[in-house]
Amino acid sequence: MTKSVRQTKLIVDLDAIFNNIVNIKKELGDVMLLPVIKANAYGTYINKYLEIFHKCDINYVAVALVDEAIELRNNGYIGNILVLNPILVEEVEAVLEYDVVINGCDLDMLKYISNIAKREVKIHIEIETGMTRTGVKLEDLDTFIDEVITLDNIVVEGVFSHFSSSSKDREYSLLQINKFEEGLAIIKHKRINIKYIHMCNSGAMFNYKECRYNMVRIGIMLYGYYPSDKIKNYIDLKPSLTLKTKINFIQSVKANTAVGYNKNYITNKDSIIATIPFGFADGLIGLETGEPYVIINELKIKIVAICMDYMMIDVTDIPNVKVGTDVFIWDNKNITVEEVAKWCNGICNYEIISSLSERIPREFI
């Protein structure tokens, strides 16, 4: 692969991620950590850097897609991989070839696999408790289990569900827990030996400690970001990502000069406008001009215009600025991912980092 020369970079601090995993595992004790590394590990690309898994003694991970599992196998990962999304017929051959564990909530799919598989396929049964996304409904679970246990080569290894509002709506979350417990009771009544039970995600890990069971799925916290401010009181995490670029053009302009599409900004005095090679095609969809800023030399610099590949910033009063000067989109000190998220229509930190474009090089340190 050709090394990128682009100077816009997402810098990934592997020591920070290691620190976060150590602290999470320490908090969980005997409960197993299931790292969620879907969507290129939330945009960090540590799924391509397997040393972190070996160093942290991680032998079970979760992804969303079969393709993500295939990539892990091709990169040399030999541990267990759970594909959280239900699979399609076209993906079955790859599931068998690459030995992955699947979401077992589709009975017709399980029957199909049972008929063609020549070895055991492990499944985790998802119970639908309130996301209305995927999973077996509680009223169908008894019959579902009766049929599953008759299928050859289908092994029920785990049972799981997913919170809808683990960081916000406690009443609804408690209803989900009750539904999950009802589902577990039905399954246990069938005398099935379930190895893994998991419902908690990052947001639920501290809000609902009683639901840690023997496995917890952790995504955003691996990378050093909190699902809510409340969680900061319970565990120390180190932000692992810094997004930076460099000024690639500077020009002096007169007062009343239009800057950007649709005359987005009009200078109110003679000004110096710098251009940085980061635009909405790189991510941060929904970012508007006005309040948002970037950091140069520890100072806040107003963003005055945004294009597909560029942003324009007003550096009139900023000393020692030239082509090649570093610009931080976030540096975790003067500006955080959470601040940027608020500017992008108030979305979450994990939405920001997971939506960063593939054309941004990732640099591991």
Image (spheres, grey):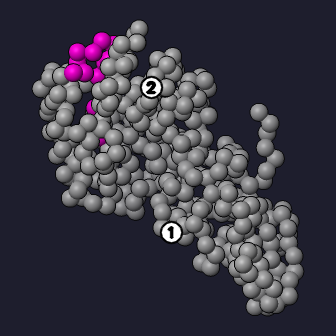
Q: Nearer the viewer, residue 202 or 157?
A: 157
Tell me if mark 2 has few (under 14), some (14-19) or many (20+) residues whose alpha carbon lies within 10 angstroms of its own. few
Question: Helix or strand or loop: what does disc 1 sit on?
Answer: loop
Magenta span contains residue 153: yes
Pick the quarter of the image with the N terminus. Answer: top right
**Mark 1, residue position:** 345
Q: Residue at x 41, y 43 (%)?
A: 218
Q: Residue at 34% across / 15% down in the picture?
A: 114
Q: Residue at x 55, y 61 (%)?
A: 337
Q: Is residue 233 above or below residue 363?
A: below
Assess whether residue 218 is covered by the magenta stretch. Answer: no
Q: Picture quarter containing residue 309? A: bottom right
Would you place residue 63 above or below residue 312 in this image? Answer: above
Which label's residue is closer to the chain start, 2 or 1? 2
Q: Which residues are magenta?
A: 147-161
Name the image quarter holding the C terminus. Answer: top right
The mark found on residue 49 in the picture is none
What amino acid is at disc 1? Answer: Asn
Q: Seen in the image, is 239 located left or right of residue 82?
A: right
> Looking at the picture, does residue 103 appear above or below residue 161?
above
Residue for badge 2: 89
